[in-house]
Image (spheres, grey):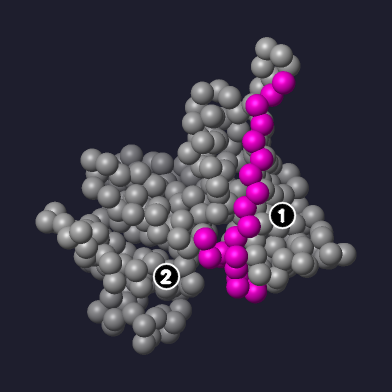
Amino acid sequence: MATDRIPRKVGVVGYGRLGQSLVSRLLAQGSELGLELVFVWNRNPGHMVGSVPPALQLQDLDTLEGRHPDLVIEVAHPKIIHESGAQILRHADLLVGSPSALADQTTEQQLLEASHRWGHAVFVARGALWGTEDINRLDALGGLQSLRVTMATHPDGFRLEGPLAAAPVGGSRTVLYEGPVRGLCPLAPRNSNTMAAAALAAPSLGFDSVVGVLVADLSLTDMHVVDVELTGPPGPTGRSFAVHTHRENPAQPGAVTGSATVAAFWRSLLGAGSPPSGRGA
């Protein structure tokens, strides 16, 4: 349905698979949804040639102010949030597509301070996390005692750093990491975003108490599997509330982002791109 309100101007930072999908949909559907794409930036500008109109290609991220965005969507790499997140918030709301960046406490504090100073909002995309709102509500009511997120996929789908990059994969299924999400994020910045989203949805536990498990599974050549397990405190009978969800997300061999995650991110974009009176990602 066409809208008669002033379009929200949107910029996209990152032009990998997810960025390409978002840009394509914004160009095709943005006007009817009250969204106007005003720039696309990519670390390698050559990847935009032939698919992003030249007028929309932003060569220098530091010049985004000239495009007057209302919302900037980051779908590049956590480094962008570390290096430019606070600066982006001087000029626009920010939808963080790499929440693993927020495991760094300095970065998180910088974004909070910039948001308050400049009056712009920070949104976090839920990505592949199933049940985000339920986790958040349970946590707010004091009913969350433990939260564990396991992501398993073929090792070709991992982009690991530090000691994890050299970790041997033995047998058909190998646990590469099990521990606090904060410790995993810098080692697997592109493969821990689901876990980071869980830590942000459950602030009473946060990055230090939500457990992340990263599993290399040679049988999962075309999917990412995410298991979310949570428990509440014991009730009057001594038994605890418990939930276990199992999500199988189809993915191209070697892909970091699963197919269903792309659709979920579009919904987060629409939530963040709504008018200030009723928005939320």
Residue occupying the point 28% across, 75% down: 56
Residue type pointed to by label 1: Leu
Kindly state the secondary structure of the residue where label 2 is placed.
helix
Residue type pointed to by label 2: Ser
Q: Is residue 207 placed above or below 189 in the rendered structure? A: above
For the residues carrying marks 2 and 1, which lies nearer the camera in this image?
2
Q: Is residue 1 visible?
A: yes
Q: Nearer the viewer, residue 183 or 22?
A: 22
Magenta stretch encompasses residue 250: yes
Mark 2, other Cα within 10 Å: few <14 / some 14–19 / many ≥20: some
Residue on which the image places disc 2: 21
Asked where in the image residue 47 lies, by quadrant, the reply is bottom left
Asked where in the image residue 145 lies, by quadrant, the reply is top right
Residue on which the image places disc 1: 214
Q: Which residues are magenta?
A: 239-260
Mark 1, other Cα within 10 Å: few <14 / some 14–19 / many ≥20: many
CA–CA distance between discs 2 and 1?
26 Å
Asked where in the image residue 19 lies, by quadrant, the reply is bottom left
Where residue 260 sits: x, y (%)? 52, 60
Q: Is residue 85 visible?
A: no
Furthest residue in direction bottom, as rendered: 50
Q: Is residue 232 placed above or below 237 in the rendered structure? A: below
Residue occupying the point 32% across, 64% down: 11
Q: Quadrant of the N terminus?
A: bottom left
Where residue 97 sits: x, y (%)? 47, 57
Q: Is residue 156 placed above or below 47 in the rendered structure? A: above
